[in-house]
Image (cartoon, coloured by chain):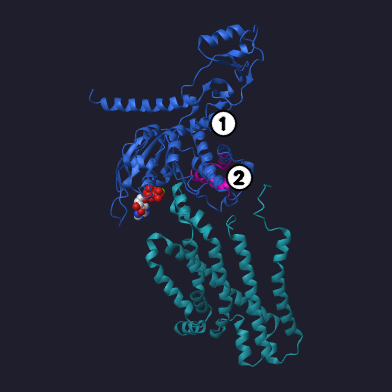
Chain colours: A blue, B cyan
Amino acid sequence: MPEHGGVPIELRGVTKRFPGAGAPAVDRLDLLIPAGEIVVLLGPSGCGKTTTMRMVNRLEEPTSGDILIDGQNSRDINPNQLRRHIGYVIQQAGLFPHMTVARNVAQVPKLLGWDSRRIAGRVDELLDLVGMDPGLFRDRYPRALSGGQQQRVGVARALAADPPVLLMDEPFGALDPITRERLQDELLRLQEELAKTIVFVTHDVDEALKIGDRIAMMQRGSRIVQYAAPAEILTDPADDYVEQYLGGESSMKLLRLTKVGDIRLDRVPHAAEDADTERLLAEIEAGGDQYALIVDEARHPLRWVTVDDLAGRTGPVGDLGDPVGDTILGRMTLQDALESLLNADTDVVPVVGRRRVYSGVISLSTVQQAIQDIKARERERRRRRHDGPRG
Amino acid sequence: MTVTTEAMPEPGVGRAAGMLVPPLCYLAVAAVMVGYTQVAPLDSIEQRSLTLGFLAQRTLEHIQLVAVSTVLVLLVALPLGILLTRRAMRWATPGVLALVNLGQATPAVGLIVLLAVIFQIGFWTAIVALVAYSLLPTLRNTMVGLEQVDPALVDAGRGIGMSATGVLRHVELPMAAPIILSGVRTTLVLNVGTASIAAFIGSGGLGDLITTGVSTQRTLILVTGCVLIAVLALLIDWLGGVAERLLAPKGLS
Ligand SMILES: Nc1ncnc2c1ncn2[C@@H]1O[C@H](COP(=O)(O)OP(=O)(O)OP(=O)(O)O)[C@@H](O)[C@H]1O
Ligand SMILES: [Mg+2]
């Protein structure tokens, strides 16, 4: 079945006051969540993240204010109908222990009155989507699953009726760090395909930076201190509170956010094995380099050749030079690339993109330059924005 | 046939056969007891109370008392228990529980005689007494069972778009089923015992053998009555156990 993308959500002056409580849990909140983006609500315990999220699917009714989902006021939609079209994932997955995995996933389609053949097909499709073998897991009970597997099923259940919106309340909070990382990666991979509008609640800064297209930094009363992309939050925290919450190491965090494929890589001369030695030598010296990279027909990096290897030789390059030891993948984070660089035998390491095709080289100074570029770019953007209204 | 995990073995044929051993033992005891009364030398009073037909009729009456009262308990306790655990009705819980406790705390004989004085002697008076006396376990377990359901599951149910009754039917009741069923089992066993007292107000049942045995000083009649009641209680308890196992949803423990 074709999966559908997301729809925008708009919160307008939303307030939630619990009976008996003094200050409102959510105080006149305005928030625009663009279609197809992951918006992370980030803030300390008790600041109102969960309450904000639960008002979107009307598990809590706003005391005042409006919530528009794809332009339609949520008050005008029957709550049960509304919730069947908004995926809901909670910590510990909240699977029904007395139902098999398949029945858990089938709940929303069943509520929507799908016939059983269509439901069965959809269940298998979804289990595949979240990386679980339907044949193996379909008939298991949640008790017989690990925490990570339960959470995958929880995501499958939420996606069952292909809702445009997904609400996730600390979905990975109870998992060990390795499983959490893996599920985060898979959520991002899923999102590339599905492009849902996802509201994601967490109080883990690293998770927010990694997952979010935008982050809403919140204070008590769901007051938004800053609403921006992760890189901007890191390079330009709105105030001391945000800076403190981020907990320093902003450059390290930028390294974790940025992919190797997204920065400007260094270039060295490269040639095939049948290239002429003298021509290659001339090219190297013309560029002021000391070495070149030899690649095969598919442009996979093979060997490094230095000026000394080539000097005084004629004919094709052949198998001159030393084999390339390490390569770095374009989809690695700069942090992982840094780790590889520090452990590599050479100062400069080739970067490969899709299908391991050569796309440039990277060294420690490339990484350093990239971080400085990002910061400069953010500074520039900020300056333009501040000057903009006046000029 | 699908692959199930090791952790969830279905009751196999061997286990099903093994399950039948206790009830067969109980039945054997009853058969020996009844058989003895048929071959032993009896005087005329004993003969009248210990014919097969008479025993069968008393047993049937007893089962009727238990069955009807238990069904009535279910009809009252389940809806009441559900109602009292809804958020809007929580305030009424202590009062209702106190009232039901009162029924249970009254000595059974006293309650039955009192009711017989107020109303009249007979089957339905005995039923009323039995219901009043055995309502508590089922009602309390229904409430406890529903209250111990993880609120996160109820929340998840509502969150994916189940209605309140949908959550009750598909989540809360199945999750509470083991506890509710064990309450029903207690009610059943309680009813088998208490139904013996119904003989005091002429509602028949196996208790009749005991009162006859005592009043005519015939130990054999008395013992036969006691043994048959005990066997019936054990059999019904066993049936309750089987029902608990069959009706409780899988995947819970
Ligand atoms: N049902 C409720 N009744 C009364 N007060 C509530 C209720 N739910 C939440 N609150 C209060 O509202 C405030 C915000 O709670 P909320 O659960 O939204 O915080 P949160 O940001 O999700 O926190 P956490 O990170 O701990 O989950 C808290 O002060 C909390 O005590
Ligand atoms: Mg929360």
In this rendering, would B234 be left or right of A290? right
Mark 1, Cα crowd under 10 Å, few <14 / some 14-19 / many 20+, is few
The residue that appears at 60% across and 64% down in the rendered structure is: B244
Q: Is residue B149 above or below residue A67?
A: below
Looking at the image, is mark 2 or mark 1 nearer the viewer?
1
Say the numbered circle drawn on residue A343. 1
Residue A33 % position (x, y): 37, 36
Between the C-alphas of marks 2 and 1, the distance is: 44 Å
Up/down of A12 relative to A322, above or below:
below
The location of residue A190, given as percent across then percent down, is 51, 35
Quarter of the image where the C terminus of chain B is located: bottom right
- N-terminal of the pair, mark 2 or mark 1, is 2
Judged left or right of residue B10, residue A35 is left
Identify the residue position indicated by label 2 in the image: A138
Provide the major secondary structure of the magenta segment.
helix
Q: Position of residue B32 (x, y in %)?
A: 74, 80
Residue closest to the far left = A390
Q: Amino acid at mark 1?
A: Asn
Is label 2 in contact with label 1 (beta carbons under 8 Å)?
no
